[in-house]
Amino acid sequence: MIDQLQPGAVRPLADDYVTVYESPDPAGVYCYSPAIIVLPGGRIVATIDLGGKGIVNLDGPKGSRNGYIVQGKVFVSDDGGSSWRHTADFPFLHARPFLAGGALYVLGHCVNIMIMRSDDGGETWSEPVLLTEEGDWHQAPCNVHYTEENVYLVMENIVPNDLAIWPVSCMEPVLMRARLDADLMKAESWTYASKLSARDAFPSEALDYFGVPFFTETPHHRAGQVNCAPIGWLETNVVQFTDPNHYWHDPEGKTFYLWARAHTGGTGYAAIAKVVENPDGTMTTMLATAPSGKRAVFVPCPGGQMKFHILYDEPSKLYWLLSSQSTDSMTRKEKLPPDRFDLPNNERHRLQLHYSRNCIDWCFAGIVSIGATARESRHYASMAIDGDDLYVLSRSGDHRARDAHNGNLITFHKIRNFRSLLY
């Protein structure tokens, strides 16, 4: 594909990749949820999960989410991502690795939130434990945020509902907090913010002039129609604004913003909320407001229609955004190529990178990687910084993939000297 580009065209930053995991059965075992972290000694740790009917034939522990069988995996690399070694399996999904108090944790869910711990850099792991005993939890491996004393991340609870379609309108992004010096395997170490569902925060009947939702909402999936689940938010990142000139800066450092994928049927927007820490240590979730006093739910975000990853880089004082590029969301569904997945806004084979001072005004930094066809996805990616380089772990596929959603590869991409992309 690169050879076919015209001189002066934008060329992918990291089309070459190393395969971290390849499905043994592309028709029945699908690769999901890549997450990545670089340890202080330089080791890279990656987590993924697998789904599909073929999971029952794999060795190792498995979990069941309402009858859907899943398996998570841990991989490590000690040579900058050139080779990878499998070290563990775990019975939950949507996991992400993070450091706290010198230990490496992996947190995800299988209905309830689950966590496990490694004290030797990912070689060996504790048995997973439950952090919750109620709820119906969801997420994707989005970012992890640190302050001097605490670690923060977002999980999402699904409100009980009678929808027969994707329940994103019933999701409640919940900010979780724990002290860095606590034992994070203990449920009591975690504090949870109050809950706010999408259907309560921004019911579609209250919206107009914004083209949201783009398609008529369909609470039940039916063949022969455009099926668009009721609008919602999901797959949530957490950010803070430390620039005192930012309109949403909190000089007390007690306000956190939730940046979520916006499911609207359209493209180019994220859905946001904010969480305020109270004097008693509790956390309250609410909608953000503009200086005018108007509520702010939808904000500009290239690729905000798909799972994205936001990472704050201290040396550049910039937020970096890894997301899916959409090129034809206004094409009628029946006119899309046969290998395109689902709604027109569901293009999944073009992975892009942006940066911003403020999470609103995004500058295009480059295309990370492009699949050769719409089936060959590069999406749902996570990233980590290692010195001057940016590492990207992508949920990917090749020509053997079942479709763009259910890929057969997890791929590692390296963007060298990524700060040189600034202009």
Image (spheres, rainbow, N blue to C red):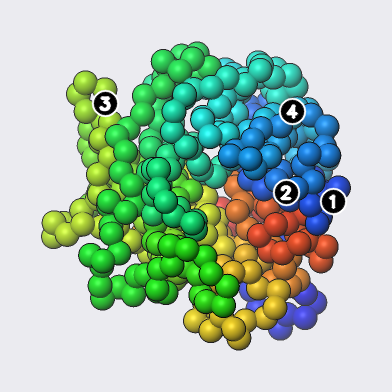
Which residue is under mark 1? 25
Residue 401: which disc? none
Residue 78: x and y, percent? 78, 32
- The 10 Å Cα crowd at callout 4, few under 14, some 14 to 19, many 20 or more, is some
Vertical placement of residue 364 versus 175, above or below: below
Which residue is under mark 3? 282
Say what amino acid the circle numbered 1 marks. Answer: Asp
For marks 4 and 3 on the same chain, the one whose residue lies earlier in the sequence: 4
Viewer-closest of 272 and 130:
130
Residue 127: x and y, percent? 66, 17
Q: Kindly report which numbered mark, 4 or 3, lies closer to the viewer in this rendering.
A: 4
Q: Which residue lies at the image location 28% right of the left edge and 40% below the top edge? A: 285
Say what amino acid the circle numbered 4 marks. Answer: Pro
Helix, strand or loop status at disc 1: loop
Which residue is under mark 2? 52
Q: Kindly report which numbered mark, 2 or 3, lies closer to the viewer in this rendering.
A: 2
Inter-mark Cα distance, 4 to 3: 36 Å
Inter-mark Cα distance, 2 to 4: 15 Å
For marks 2 and 3 on the same chain, the one whose residue lies earlier in the sequence: 2
Inter-mark Cα distance, 2 to 1: 10 Å
Asked if labels 1 and 2 touch by Cβ distance under 8 angstroms, the answer is yes
Asked if labels 1 and 3 touch by Cβ distance under 8 angstroms, the answer is no
Residue 274: x and y, percent? 29, 44
For marks 3 and 1 on the same chain, the one whose residue lies earlier in the sequence: 1
Q: Is residue 385 left or right of residue 187?
A: right
Helix, strand or loop status at disc 3: loop
